[in-house]
């Protein structure tokens, strides 16, 4: 069965929607640097239920949700899905694989028509080094555990 929207026919979003204004993670980024990031992002639209990232993908892009909502899903051993979270406009995901270059730990799919800006891991690394306030904000989001 075909989605309500073909990838090439997705036109829910105007060019003005392709903005990183309001992305929480980027709040510490100077406006001129944020504009540069916005310009180098690859902008992709996803239809409802379309997979953005699959579990154990080797991709390393960071995604910024400009419009829409996504579902974060994992699977039990029996193949049963477990919803871990919903992320909304202004949220981001994929930061950890962009840093450690390891496999994706969950499936991300669009809960509704969604527009994301994709940033390469190389450009994300550059942004982290250029904007220490953003790097610190990112560190605060990651859970820390220490083994005895």
Image (tube, grey):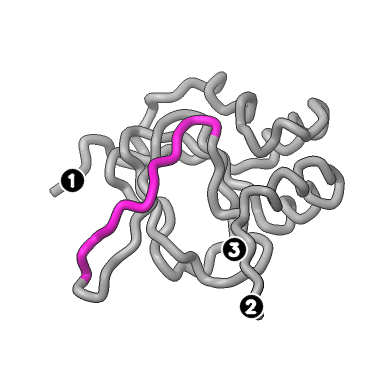
Q: Which residue corresponds to mark 2?
A: 147
Residue at left 44%, top 40%? 87
Position of 35 relative to 137 (above/below)? above
Prevailing secondary structure of the magenta residues = strand
Secondary structure beneath label 3? helix
Count neighbours of disc 3 (C-alpha within 10 A) and say few if under 14, some if 14 to 19, many if 20 or more. some
Q: Is residue 142 left or right of residue 82?
A: right
Tell me which numbered mark, 1 or 3, is placed earlier along the sequence: 1
Q: Which residue corresponds to mark 3?
A: 97
Q: Nearer the viewer, mark 2 or mark 3?
A: 2
Total numbered labels placed on residues in the image = 3
**Residue 33 image offset from top left, x and y in percent:** 81, 34
Q: Nearer the viewer, residue 57 or 92?
A: 92
Residues at badges 1 and 3 in contact (C-beta under 8 Å)? no
Q: Nearer the viewer, mark 1 or mark 3?
A: 3
**Residue 126 image offset from top left, x and y in percent:** 80, 52
Query: In this picture, which residue range is highlighted in magenta?
Result: 79-90
**Residue 148 image offset from top left, x and y in percent:** 66, 80
Secondary structure beneath label 1? loop
Quarter of the image for residue 94 reads bottom right
**Residue 136 image offset from top left, x and y in percent:** 77, 47
Q: Which residue corresponds to mark 1?
A: 2
Tell me which numbered mark, 1 or 2, is placed earlier along the sequence: 1
Separation of residues labelled 1 and 2 (CA atoms): 48 Å
Tell me which numbered mark, 2 or 3, is placed earlier along the sequence: 3
Separation of residues labelled 2 and 3 (CA atoms): 22 Å
Secondary structure beneath label 2? loop
Q: Is residue 119 left or right of residue 111?
A: right
Q: Nearer the viewer, mark 1 or mark 2?
A: 2
């Amino acid at each position: 069965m075909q989605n309500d929207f073909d990838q090439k026919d997705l036109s829910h979003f105007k060019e003005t929607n392709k903005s990183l204004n309001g992305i929480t993670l980027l709040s510490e980024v100077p406006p001129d640097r944020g504009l540069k990031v916005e310009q180098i992002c690859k902008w992709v639209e996803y239809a409802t239920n379309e997979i953005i990232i699959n579990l154990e993908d080797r991709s390393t892009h960071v995604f910024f949700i400009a419009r829409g909502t996504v579902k974060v899903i994992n699977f039990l051993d029996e193949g049963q899905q477990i919803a871990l979270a919903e992320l909304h406009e202004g949220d981001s995901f994929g930061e950890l694989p962009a840093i450690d270059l390891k496999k994706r730990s969950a499936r991300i799919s669009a809960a509704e028509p969604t527009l994301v800006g994709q940033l390469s891991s190389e450009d994300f690394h550059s942004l982290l080094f250029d904007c220490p306030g953003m790097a610190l904000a990112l560190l605060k989001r990651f859970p820390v555990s220490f083994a005895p």
